[in-house]
Image (cartoon, grey):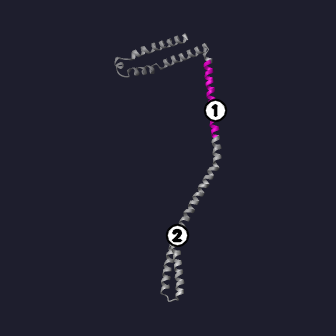
Amino acid sequence: MKKIISLTLFLLLLLSLLVLPAAASETDASAVTEGGGFTETLAAFITTNADTLLGILTLVGSLLVAFFYKTGLMPVLRSGLSALGELLGKSRDLTEHFTKETGDRLAHMEESVAPMLDAMRHGEELLLTLEAKLSTLEDALNKSEEERRTTAAVLRTETELFYELLSSVNLPEAQKDSMTESYYRLKRVLEAGE
């Protein structure tokens, strides 16, 4: 553990020795007093010394790999990464299995529901046909009712005319009484039908 701390401190010291002289040489008093001067200086330094910084980072990475290997942490790290890879593989397999199983169940449900949906569609078509027939029948009934009213009005008029004719004709009294009774019977039937 002491080696890691001393190695980290050494690298920070090395980095600061590279950054401070370059920053001091490029920074003037006006850039420091303005807002954002430090950020511009740092960006310029990183752009100018990118190859050196990359080399230092490569060195640090190599030292860390060597340290992990020497202390025995490399096999632990490798086994951890391997376990993580296996876990991701198993997770992927489970997800694929779940997706396939869910798809199969949905397909099975769709197959079992299809006859019911067909029956419902057929029932809907029958109801629409029945509704159309009922509408036609209602129209026919309305027309028939209008015709019945017209016929009843014609019969009432004819009956009144017949009665007037009966009253003006010279017939025996018994025959007139019989025809008058028939007239009133027909009149009651017509009035009851209204």
The boundaries of the magenta stretch are: 76-103
Q: Main secondary structure of the magenta part?
A: helix
Q: Residue at x 42, y 15 (%)?
A: 22
Query: Residue 21 falls in which quadrant of the image?
Result: top left
**Magenta region includes residue 61:** no
The residue tagged 1 is 94
Percent position (x, y) of residue 135?
54, 62
- In the displayed structure, would residue 186 be above or below residue 128? below
Q: Residue at x 50, y 85 (%)?
A: 166
Query: Residue 84 falls in which quadrant of the image?
Result: top right
Q: Residue at x 52, y 69 (%)?
A: 145
Disc 2 on helix, strand or loop? helix
* Number of other residues with Cα within 10 Å of mark 1, as a class: few under 14, some 14 to 19, many 20 or more: few
Percent position (x, y) of residue 172?
53, 89
Instruction: Compare residues 132 and 55 and report the one nearer the observer.
Output: 132
Q: Amino acid at mark 2?
A: Glu
The residue tagged 2 is 145
**Magenta region includes residue 98:** yes
The answer to the question of whether label 1 and label 2 lie on touching residues, with beta carbons closer than 8 A, is no
Side of 40 relative to 100 (left or right): left
Instruction: Compare residues 14 and 69 and report the one nearer the observer.
Output: 69
